[in-house]
Image (tube, rainbow, N blue to C red):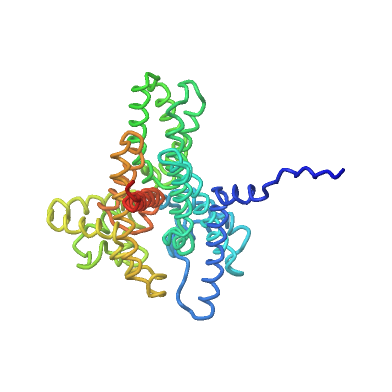
Amino acid sequence: MSTTPIPKPSVRTDQPVAALLQSVWLAIVGAFGLRVFLCLLSHRMDSKSHLGLQVIGREAGFIAWSLASGKGFANPFPGYNLVTGWLAPVFPFLWSIGLRIFNPNYGNGGIYFCQVMNSAFSALTCWPIYWLGKKLFSRKMGLAASWAWVFMPLAILFPLEWAWDQSLSALVLMLLLCATYKLREYPAVSLAWAGYGVMWGFAALVNPTLCGMLPFLLAWLAYQRWNSGAASFRPLLKATCFFLLCILPWTARNYFKLDGLVFIKSNFGLELWLGNNPAVPADAVYSSQLHPMNNYGEFVELVLSGEPGYMAAKRRAALAFIRANPGTFLDLLGRRVLDTWAGVYDSREDKWITALHLRMAEIYFCVALSLFSLAGMILALRKSAGEVLPLALCAVVFPIPYYITHTSLRYRHPIDPILTLFATYAIAQIISAINGRRKPIR
C-alpha cells in the first residue's frame, strides 16, 4: 500500500529581508554609508582636479584646535589669541576630540573626523523623522520621509562642506520634538521632565537659536495637558529649572572670562550689524567684508573693546541704522526671506556649488522643496492642526532671527528634516489623489 507523503509546511525565508527593507535602521545605515562614500570621493576629486572642495569652519576649527592643544576655549581666528565666547561650546569640544587623535599638522585626519561625525549626526536624523512621520501620519509615511532624507541634497552637502553644528542642530531639534510629543502623556512627577529640561540645555549649548522654540513648545505642552486634565505647571516649571541649571555654568564662565553678560555665545550684535548697515552690497544679504576676520579696522576695534563691548556697540549701530532706514531694512529683510527659501544668494556664494556648477540646480531644488513643504504643512494642519502644530511652528518661527540678521541655507538646516517630512506628505497626497481619479467607476 503506497502512502502519500505529507507535505511539510512551507517556511517563508523572505520575512527577515522584508523586515529589513521596512526598517528605519536600513535608512540610517544607507545615509551614513552614502555620506562617507561621497566624503572620500570629494577628497579624491579635490586632490586630483583641485576643485576647491575645502571644508569650511574657521572659527570652530581654531577654537577646537585651541582646546585640543590645551589653550582653552579661545583663539577663534588668526591673530585673535584671546578667550572667547564667539561660538556655542558643544561642537568645538566634539571636534577637539578628533584633533587630539589626529594632529592637523600631520594630515587631514581631523577634517575626516569632523566630516564623518557630521555624517553620523545627519544619518541618525532618519530615526526622529521616521518616528514623527509614523506618529503624525502613518508608518509608511515615516519610512518614506526617512528615505527622502537619505538622498536629500542639502543633508548630504552640509555634513561634508561645513565643519559646523548644523547637522547636530537638526538632530537635536528633531529629538526635542519627539520628546515633546512623548511628554504629553507623562505624569507630573516623572523624572522625564527634568530630562526634557536637560535636553533643551544641551540644545542651547549646541545652537542657541534652537531655544527660540522652547516657549512655543512649552505652551503647546501646557495646552495639551490642560485640555486633557493633567497637571502642567509643576512639570513645565521643573523642565525650565533644569534648562536654566544646564546653561548656568557656561553663562557664568562667559561672565567671568569675558567681563560681560553673555547668554551662550557673544556674536549676535556683530551678525545683526553685518546684515544691517550702509555697506551691505546691493545684491547681497550681509556685508562679509566687514567681519573682523576680513577687516583689519574691525579687528582692532574688537581687540580694544573686548567681545561684550564690541558686540554691544555693533548692536546699537545696527538698531540705529534700522530706525533711520526702515525702507532699506525691509528690502534687506525681503532679500533674506528669499534667500532662506530659494537659496538665491547662498547658491552664488557656496564654494562647492559653484565648483560643481550646480547653482541653478540648487535654486530649483530649494524652491521645489519650499513649495512642497508649504503645501504639505497646509494639508497636515487641515487634517489635524493640534497634532501638527509643533512642527509647523518650528518651520515658521525658527528662521525669523536669520531674517533679521543674515541668512544662509546652513542656518536653516535644523528645520530641513521638518521640511522633508512635510514635502513627502504633500507628494504622497498628490499621488494618492491622482491614483484615486484613475480608479474605474463601477
Judging depth in this view, the residue of 350 and 308 nearest the camera is 350
Q: Quadrant of residue 364?
A: bottom left
User: In the image as oriented, which residue stretches furthest toward the bottom?
Assistant: 49
Residue under the image location 41 percent in, 30 percent down: 240
Q: Is residue 427 above or below residue 280?
A: above
Residue 76 in view here: no
Numbered marks: total: 0
Horizontal arrangement in the rendering, residue 59 relative to residue 216 (left or right): right
Residue 279 in view here: yes
Quarter that holds the N terminus: top right
Horizontal arrangement in the rendering, residue 288 relative to residue 278 (left or right): right
Q: Residue 166, image x and y in percent?
A: 43, 54
Residue under the image location 15 percent in, 58 percent down: 328
Q: Residue 386, image x and y in percent?
A: 32, 33
Judging depth in this view, the residue of 421 and 108 nearest the camera is 421
Q: Is residue 309 above or below residue 53?
A: above
Q: Quadrant of residue 107?
A: bottom right
Q: Quadrant of residue 241?
A: top left
Q: Residue 40, image x and y in percent?
A: 56, 68
